[in-house]
Image: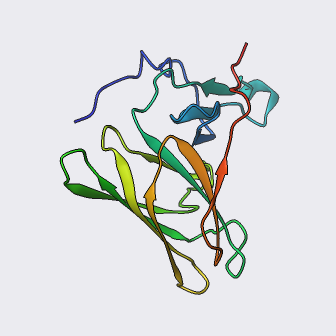
Amino acid sequence: MFEDVTISSRADHLQKGHGVSFADYDSDGDLDLFCDVGGAAPGDASHNILLQNPHHWPAWLRVKLVGTKSNRAALGAKIDATVTRPHGETRSIYRTVGGNSSFGGNSLAEHLGLGDDGIVTKLEITWPSTSAKQTLQNLSIDREIIITESADGFQVRSFLKVITPA
């Protein structure tokens, strides 16, 4: 089910758009929205807009991949996350790195919104150049991990500060 949040998200005043991007701008675990609404011609100018999401996901995991045999940005890599809910049932979340469009580009770090589901019990990466699979088990949530192709384990990215627009 969807909820109309056009007015409450402050997106009801947007003019002609030239691009949109979703990313966790302020590193608080939820996705924020940047809209490029300005034009190239002087009469078509408008201010670009950053809409900061005021909510916080109950649980999330951000996955940043670094290719070594595949391209460095891991474009085309596939992520398959198995999430185990509190009562034992599981669900899967699928992502492809770089699945963007011509009028927008999202972060290359894939954001997995887990809701109230609990823990990522399995995270499988399929690398684009070699089709090699890399699997991690029982990952802690509410953080960003950096996985390097063919390396054992992962790194945890710590955020030193939260950026808050004035």
Q: Nearer the viewer, residue 16 or 32?
A: 32
- Residue sitting at 72 percent across and 28 percent down? 161
Compared with residue 30, is residue 112 higher up or lower down, i.e. above or below?
Answer: below
Regarding residue 53, the answer to whether it shows in the image is yes
Q: How many marks?
A: 0
Q: Give residue 135's position: percent from left, percent from top.
A: 48, 72
- Residue sitting at 41 percent across and 22 percent down? 6
Regarding residue 103, the answer to whether it shows in the image is no
Q: Quadrant of residue 39?
A: top right
Q: Give residue 124's position: percent from left, percent from top.
A: 45, 70
Q: Would residue 89 be found to the left or right of residue 108 on screen?
A: left
- Residue sitting at 57 percent across and 31 percent down? 28
Q: Nearer the viewer, residue 93 or 32?
A: 93
> In which quadrant will I find the C terminus?
top right
> In which quadrant will I find the N terminus?
top left
Q: Residue furthest bottom?
A: 130
- Residue sitting at 61 percent across and 84 percent down? 129
Q: Give residue 41's position: percent from left, percent from top.
A: 79, 34
Q: Residue furthest right?
A: 42
Q: How is the image coloured?
A: rainbow
Q: Would residue 59 be found to the left or right of residue 23 on screen?
A: left
Compared with residue 32, is residue 155 higher up or lower down, i.e. above or below?
Answer: below
Q: Give residue 114's position: percent from left, percent from top.
A: 37, 44
Q: Would residue 45 be found to the left or right of residue 4 on screen?
A: right
